[in-house]
Amino acid sequence: MRKVTTILIVLIFCLPLYSIAGEKENELIDKVVAAYGGDVLANLSSYRVEEHYSSITIGQSHSPQLTEIGHSRSVLIRDLKNNKTVYDNWGTGRTGGFQGSTVTDGEKGQNVNYQTSTYGDANSPDPYAFAGGTMRTSDSVLVYELNKAREGAKLLEDEQFMNRAHHVLAMPFPLSADLKLYIDAKTFLISKMNRNNPQFGDLDYVYSRHEERNGIYHATELNFFIAGVPNLISTHRDASFNFDLPADAFSIPQNFTQEADRIDTSEMLVRKISDRVFHIGQGNGFSIFVNTSAGVVAAGGYAALTARFDRFKQESKVYKPLAYQIVTHHHADHIGGLGEAINLGAQLVTVDDNVQTIKDGVTPTPNDRDFLKISSRVSLGEGRNRVEVYEVSTIHAARFLVTYVPSEKMVFIADHMGSPFAQGTPVANAGTVDMLAALEGLNIDIRKIATAHNARIFSMQDMRDSVANYKPSVCAGNRPVCSN
């Protein structure tokens, strides 16, 4: 009985503390909502956010020595009354541009591809799944979401930001880690939002130049940082709220057709090319494994390499260790599995320009004996039981390694060509054009092409047809995202 009484006393004394904390959060949220427009914001019926950015291509440049700048645009329109959303995007880089959109009524979502004039089912109809990133870049949208989620908000210790006092409030956000809002103690406008990503670390959104739009305040400039390094630099931002929506805002263009059947990569897929050669992967990451006289050779350095290698051993009944891992190029996503390769005992086959990038981006950090540095060409193994590695140059990567299996007349490449569909000609970009020229310049007999991003094995004719159909991408002029 004494124990129960003690617990009740503790609960009674704790209750006022929780009540006071709740009052502080609600009081602060009320002031923030008022600063951004009060009832006009709280009772939004619709909003439109348009953004143009210069993007720093961290880990995706032409060479490790150069950090490049790309450009992206997006327009997000939400009809909150009817739970409809459309998200348009247009991005350009050195290999060309891509335009797409996602449309949803909350129950069914469609992805629209303007390069192929097709549409297909979206991975998720939830607008927070495909447009949550743009919602987080808008401080006024965050305040709208904060007002809805105020019961889950938590006041943290005040901090200084840009030499001004700020209240710090943690808020829940759908499909995301909690967001930390830095609220100016005088204006009650949001100066910064921070969230943590397990892979990349702290993500900081810095808002500035607040202006009034349709009775609601909105930051007209946003810069986005990954672990303190600039990633997105705002060049144009606009927003509007509580407006009448055009009838065709959420429609798919009439002349577009249903896309072809996609290959299901939700489970690990195994393509047996021969008793010695397997193409294995899941989702967006595939590798090739070849049993050579020099040991097992792999290419395709996406994360989860160990799982793919284990499946190779299971399917091939070859239980040799991994001897070599060919590094196609220096891009961050294609070195994600190299730490696993080192743990498996493999040497990393690469060019000298990429060594420091790999050392900086891979855990455990490789040492010099973990590398086999090549230039131009190398053979791993002998006779029919060999793999050849060729260095080529394309607009995608200044120094790229092509893996060739002579016995199967097959090459393995990454990024330059791909299609998620079981049939049909892949859509080419400038990188595809360069890679075809590079492969034909090697004067080797190529019949099959395996890639790091797709389950499908392409033919050399697929690549030739793709390049023959190539047209530089342009933004469809009738879409708001294309306007200057």
Image (tube, rainbow, N blue to C red):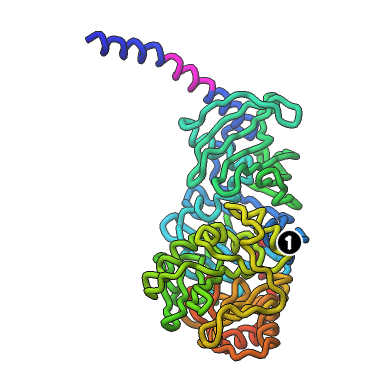
Q: How many marks?
A: 1
- On the question of residue 455 being in view, the answer is yes
SS type, badge 1: loop
Residue 288 position within the rendered picture, expressed as x and y whole percent measured from the top left = 51, 74
Reading the image, the residue beneath label 1 is: 64
Q: Which residues are magenta?
A: 16-24
The quarter of the picture where the C terminus appears is: bottom right
Above or below, 52 against 435 in this view is above
Residue 302 position within the rendered picture, expressed as x and y whole percent measured from the top left = 54, 63
The quarter of the picture where the N terminus appears is: top left
Residue 255 position within the rendered picture, expressed as x and y whole percent measured from the top left = 55, 77
Q: Residues within 10 Å of mark 1 (few under 14, many from 20)?
A: many
Residue 290 is left or right of residue 61, and the answer is: left
Q: Quadrant of residue 480?
A: bottom right
Residue situated in front as seen by the camera: 198 or 133: 198
Residue situated in front as seen by the camera: 218 or 322: 322
- On the question of residue 96 being in view, the answer is no
Question: Is residue 447 located in the magenta-colored stretch of the structure?
Answer: no
Q: Quadrant of residue 54?
A: bottom right
Which residue is at 37% across, 70% downward?
A: 314
Residue situated in front as seen by the camera: 218 or 91: 91
Which residue is at 50% across, 69% downward?
A: 286
Residue 360 is left or right of residue 301, and the answer is: right
Which residue is at 40% across, 73% downward?
A: 318
Which residue is at 48% across, 77% downward?
A: 291
Q: Amino acid at mark 1?
A: Pro
**Overall secondary structure of the magenta section:** helix
Above or below, 136 against 330 in this view is above
Q: Quadrant of residue 121?
A: bottom left
